[in-house]
Amino acid sequence: MSNLLEIKNLSVVISDDKRVLVNDVSFELKAGEAVGVVGESGSGKTLSALSILGLLARGLRIDSGEINFQGKDLLKLSTEEMREIRGNQIAMIYQDPMTALNPVMKIGDQLMEVLDSHEHEIADRKAHILNGLAAVGIADPDRAFDSYPHEFSGGMRQRVMIAMSLLLSPQLLIADEPTTALDVTIQRQILALVARERKRRQMSMLWITHDLGVVANLVDRVIVMYAGRVVEVGTVEEMFKAPKHPYTAGLLASLPAVGNNREKLASIPGVPPKPWQVINNCAFAPRCSSAKDICFSHRPELKNNQTGSVACFFPLGGAS
Amino acid sequence: MTLTIRDVTKKYSIKSRKTVVNALNGVSLTVEKGKTLGIVGESGCGKSTLARLIVGLEQPTEGSLNWSGAPLGQGVRNGLRSHHTKTQLVFQDPYSSLNPRQTIGACIAEVIKTHKLRAEDQVNARVIELLSVVGIAEDMQNRFPHQLSGGQRQRVAIARALAAEPDLLVLDEPVSALDVSVRADVMNLLVDLKNQFNLTYIFISHDLSMVRHISDDIAVMYLGRVVEYGSWSEVLSSPKHPYTKALIQSIPEHTTVRGIDFENVLEGEVPDPANLPKGCAFNQRCPIAVPACAEKVPELLELTSHHLVACPEVLK
Ligand SMILES: Nc1ncnc2c1ncn2[C@@H]1O[C@H](COP(=O)(O)OP(=O)(O)OP(=O)(O)O)[C@@H](O)[C@H]1O
Ligand SMILES: Nc1ncnc2c1ncn2[C@@H]1O[C@H](COP(=O)(O)OP(=O)(O)OP(=O)(O)O)[C@@H](O)[C@H]1O
Ligand SMILES: [Mg+2]
Ligand SMILES: [Mg+2]
C-alpha cells in the first residue's frame, strides 16, 4: 500500500513566544488504513489534526515540517486549493460540534453550503443530505433539515457533523473524539457506517479518541502521544498486548477492571507536564517507574523496531 | 434530605414548525442525600433536559422537582440565588458553557466571589487549589477557554462547579473528553469528595464503566422515560429491559482486539420525540415485542424491591 498521508517533523508553536505545543511529530497513513491516535489530554492530538487541514487558530502557527497528501505538500498550497481539498478529499469531525456548526443557521442550509462550495456530481442535493442524516440515525431527517443546532441534543449535533463529514465521500476522514457524546448503541451504528464506507471505497481514517475499547476494535495501528510528541507507534495488537512505552502501559493500567470491582481506579502517578515546557529529556521520566539517570538528561528518539517504534531508553519487554 | 422528581414532563414547542418535542414524558425518581444516581440512555432521550430542570435552569412543563422539601428552580425564578449555590451543573459541552472572554482563573474566581465563599485575599489561592485538584497547572489560569484542549476545558468546568461547594452536583458527561489516566484521577476525586462531604451526585454518562464505578442506583432512559431502575449491580449484572440489554451488549470492550465486526446490535431507527409512537417507545425495535406493546405505555413496575422495569414481557 502506498502512503496517502505523510507527516514529517511537524512542529506547532504559539506565534508570540514560540512555545512549542506539537513537537517534531512524524507519522504516515496508508491508503485504506485506519490509525488511532491516543494519549494524554493536552498532548497535541487536536492541534496535529487541525494542522493537516490548515485550520490552526489565530495565534498558533506551524514552525516546521511537511504534510504530504497524495504527494502534495499541503503546507505549500494556496488558501483556495486548501479549501477545495478540505471537506472534499479530507474531512474532519471536530471534538466540539458547536465549533463546526453555525448556531444561527439551519442544519439543512449548512449541509447545502458544503455541497455548494465543492465540485461534485450529486444531482438531487437535498435527497443526498436527507439520506446522509438518516444513515447516522437521525429519526426525522426532514425535521433535522429545518432545525437549528441548539434544538438538538449533544449526540444529535455530533451525528449531524458526522453526516456532514461524509457528504462528499472523502478519501481521508479525520475524527476527533467523534463518538464520545453518543450512547453505545448509536456509537455502534456510526462505527458500522464508517467501517462500511472504509471497505467500500478504501477510505483512510485518523481516529483520535480516549476510548480504548473503540481503538482496540476499529483501527489497524495506534499512535500514542505525550507532551506534544509521538512516544509510541505500533499495531493495535502490539499496543494492547505488549505496550513498549511505560506511558502506554500506564494508560492501559488505568482502565477499570472488568467485573463488579469498584476499588479506587489506578492512574499514572504524578502530574502531566506543562504543555510548553522546553525539556531536553524524556517528558515522562518524572512519572516513570523505570526511569534511570539518562532519562532525565537525554531525550529518547523515536526508534523503529520490528513491529513499530518507541521513544524510550528502556522500553518494556526488552530491546528497542 | 432527598431529591424528589415527580411525574416530570418537558415539552419544547417549536413555533416555526408548529411541532412539539416531547423531551421528557413523565419521569419520577428519588435520590437520597449522599447517594449517586447514574443516568444512562439513548442519545436524545432527555438526560441533559432533566439535568437542566434539576438545577433550575429550566422549568418542567408538568410535575415537580424538590430538594430537601423545597422546590428546585424556584429560587432562580424568584431572584433568590441561594438554591443556586447548593446545586451545580457541569455541562455536557464545556465549550459553550464557559465564557469565551473570561480567563479560566477569573471564571472560577467569579463563582467564589459571588457566593462569598472565601475572603477577598484568599480567592486566588482557592482558584489555584481547585485547578490543581483537576490536574491543571496554575500558570494556565490566565488562558482563555479556546486556548485549552478539550479535556482541559472539561476539567475547568468541573473545577468551577466544585468552587461553589454544592450539596447536589449534576455531572453531564463529565469525563468523556479525558484520557483514561486523568479520568481515573477525576473519578477518584469525585468519590473522595462525595465521601468526605456527603455530596449527592447525578452522574450522566454514556460510559457504562464509569457509571458502574460511581453509582449507587442507575436509571436507564429511553425517549423521555425511565425504562429500568435499580441498584447498580442489579441493573448492570442482570439487566432486564431489552433496551438495557442492547446497551450493555454494545459496549466496545478493550479486551477484544479487532474482535467486533461492528454490526448494529439494535436495528431500526430511534423514534422521533416530536411524534411519539403509540405504546412502548421501544416496541418497533424490540426483539421480544408482542402486539400489545404497541397499544399501551408500560408502567415502571417492581421486579424485586429495588429493581424496577417498564416491560410487561419480562415481568411475566
Ligand atoms: N490557541 C491556543 N493557544 C495556546 N495554547 C493552546 C491553544 N490551543 C491549544 N493549546 C494548548 O496546546 C496543547 C495541545 O492541545 P490539543 O488541543 O492539541 O490537545 P489534545 O491532545 O487534543 O487534548 P484533549 O485530549 O484534551 O483534547 C494543550 O496543552 C493546549 O492547552
Ligand atoms: N431547546 C430545545 N428546543 C427544542 N428541542 C430541544 C431543545 N432542547 C432539547 N431538545 C430536544 O429534546 C430531546 C432531548 O434532548 P437532551 O439534550 O435532553 O438529550 P440527551 O439525553 O441529553 O442526549 P445526548 O445523550 O445526545 O446528550 C431531543 O430530541 C432534543 O432534540
Ligand atoms: Mg483534543
Ligand atoms: Mg445530553
Image (cartoon, coloured by chain):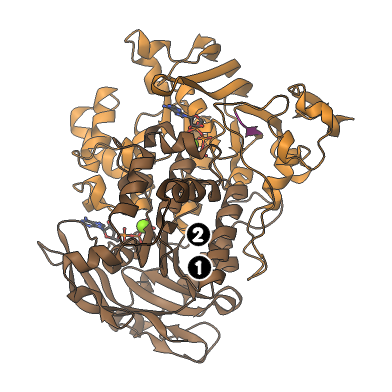
Residue type beneath disc 1: Gly
Residue shown at the point (83%, 26%) measured from the top left: B292
Q: In this view, does B245 lie to the left or right of B224?
A: right
Q: Residues within 10 Å of mark 1 (few under 14, many from 20)?
A: some
Q: Is residue A262 magenta?
A: no
Secondary structure found at label 1: helix
Front-most of B131 and A108?
A108
Q: Is residue A293 left or right of residue B101?
A: right
* Subunit of label 2: A
Q: Dividing the image into 4 quarters, which one contains the N terminus of chain B?
A: top right
Chain A is shown in which shade?
Answer: brown
Chain B is shown in which shade?
Answer: orange
Can marks 2 and 1 be said to lie on one chain? yes
The residue to which callout 2 is attached is A267
Q: Which of marks 2 and 1 is nearer the N terminus?
A: 1
Q: Eyeballing the image, is B7 above or below B158?
A: above
Give residue A250's mark. Answer: 1
Give residue B87's mark. Answer: none
Residue situated furthest front in the rendering: A123
Residue shown at the point (73%, 25%) measured from the top left: B279
Residue type beneath disc 2: Ser
x%, y% of residue B285? 71, 40
